Image: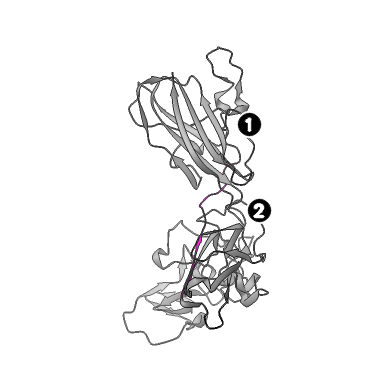
Amino acid sequence: MDVSSTNPGYLIVNSELMSYTSASGTEIGGVSRGLEDTVAVPHPSGTFIQKYECGDVSLRRINTKHNIVDTGIDINSYYIKIPIGSTDIDGNPIAVNRDSDGSTGNNPALSFNKEKSVGGTNAYASENVLYDTVTPFISAILPPESEASISAQLKSVSATSVNGNETSFLEQPYVDVELNQPNKMNSLSMVASKVNTESYLSNLVKDKSSVLSLSLSTTNYNLSPMIFLDTASAEYTKYLINNPISDYISDKRTSNFIEDPHAAVYISKTINLARPSNTLRVNVSAYRHKSADFRVMYSLIKPEMNTTLQVFEMFPGYNNLTSDLDSDGFLDIIDTSNNSGLPDTFTSSSADNEFIQYQYTAPNVGPFVGFAIKIVMSTTKMDKYPRFKDIRAIALL
């Protein structure tokens, strides 16, 4: 779509943003300078001029404030919907209104004309810092003999897990925390970005999403603690875990290394056997919250194969095992296409910090001369991730 008086184009010259309404050869016309609070200054002859667009879409529609689309959000990625109207979500003018384009008799619909990877090291976006553990670092001088002390409390706001349904931006009560030590929070929390703080947290104390309160006390009138505010800091930690798959039987992306969408994955080293085996068993001691899940898989090296591991297979699972019809000491698999990666018997979720034994058996899958184990972990509450104490694999004849 050509530029015109009703559809201006945009240029960036050094740091100044300009619009133009005509272009012919090496000349542009109808120039308006100093847009979006940039400063109009003289530019030397030969200065590089660049279109302010990406894939035929004005960057004024991209380099602005957006409401993130609720679908497709992952740990390190999300989608934004480019505004096609004349203003951004705050009502600031950005470009010509294109919301009726694409209909009969109008201009073509606004769209990118190609797929591009842009931005490089200069690209940035505001973000919230999610955490379930916080370590406040405070340097202090305390008098000897415990005559003085410092106690701390932290106030936070709630956050939503990837693939979760918690409500964000809810003020949480103060909780006691230990200074210079990791403190596990009661739920997932966040340090909100500036734009989200201004939009959702204006009613909080000092408009802050994370507030550390220090209480200094002493039993000696002449002595008090001393803290160094210029070196105060905090470390916020979370575990990278999501919940990308709802049906492990039909969704086979976990079977390889590249397509697996899980953020939390354990893969053992390859175990080579001195002699062939026929059955594989894995025993795991694990803590699993009711919001969390993990599935166990295996990859085998057969005698006729090279030593390269092939795809990973799910263990059968308790709902795909039947009685020991062939009397070999193992429950028989009903249908290998329905393997789910669940344990041999139904196992309830854990109580707080309770580790439960899980057993997984793949009977009569040999002969094999080597194997590796893979565990994929998921949860709808990022602060309630699976934890493991022991993982033992046994090759049986």
The one nearer the camera, 25 or 358, is 358
**Residue 106 visible here:** no
Residue at the left extreme?
46
Residue 341: % across, % down: 55, 33
Residue 141: % across, % down: 46, 75
Residue on which disc 1 sits: 346
Kindly identify the amino acid type of the residue bearing the numbered disc 2: Asn
Which residue: 48% across, 42% down? Answer: 260
Residue on which disc 2 sits: 165
The one nearer the camera, 227 or 212, is 227
Give the vertical position of 88 relative to 160 (above or below).
below
Give the vertical position of 167 relative to 386 (above or below).
below
Kindly identify the amino acid type of the residue bearing the numbered disc 1: Phe
Which label sits in the foreground, 2 or 1? 1
Mark 2 and mark 1: span between their CA atoms?
A: 26 Å
The one nearer the camera, 149 or 371, is 149
Which one is earlier in the sequence, the residue at label 2 or at label 1?
2
Answer with left or right where residue 176 lies relative to residue 25: right
Give the vertical position of 314 relative to 112 (above or below).
above
Residue 209: % across, % down: 60, 69
Tell me which segment is drawn in magenta.
231-246
Answer with left or right where residue 151 lies relative to residue 202: left
Q: Judging from the image, what secondary structure is the residue with disc 1 in? A: loop
How is the rendered protein coloured? one colour
Residue 175: % across, % down: 62, 64
Q: Does residue 241 belong to the magenta stretch?
A: yes
**Residue 195 visible here:** yes
Answer with left or right where residue 280 lies relative to residue 335: left
Q: Does residue 280 belong to the magenta stretch?
A: no
Give residue 122's quadrant in the image. bottom left
Q: Judging from the image, what secondary structure is the residue with disc 2 in? A: loop
Residue at the top extreme?
326
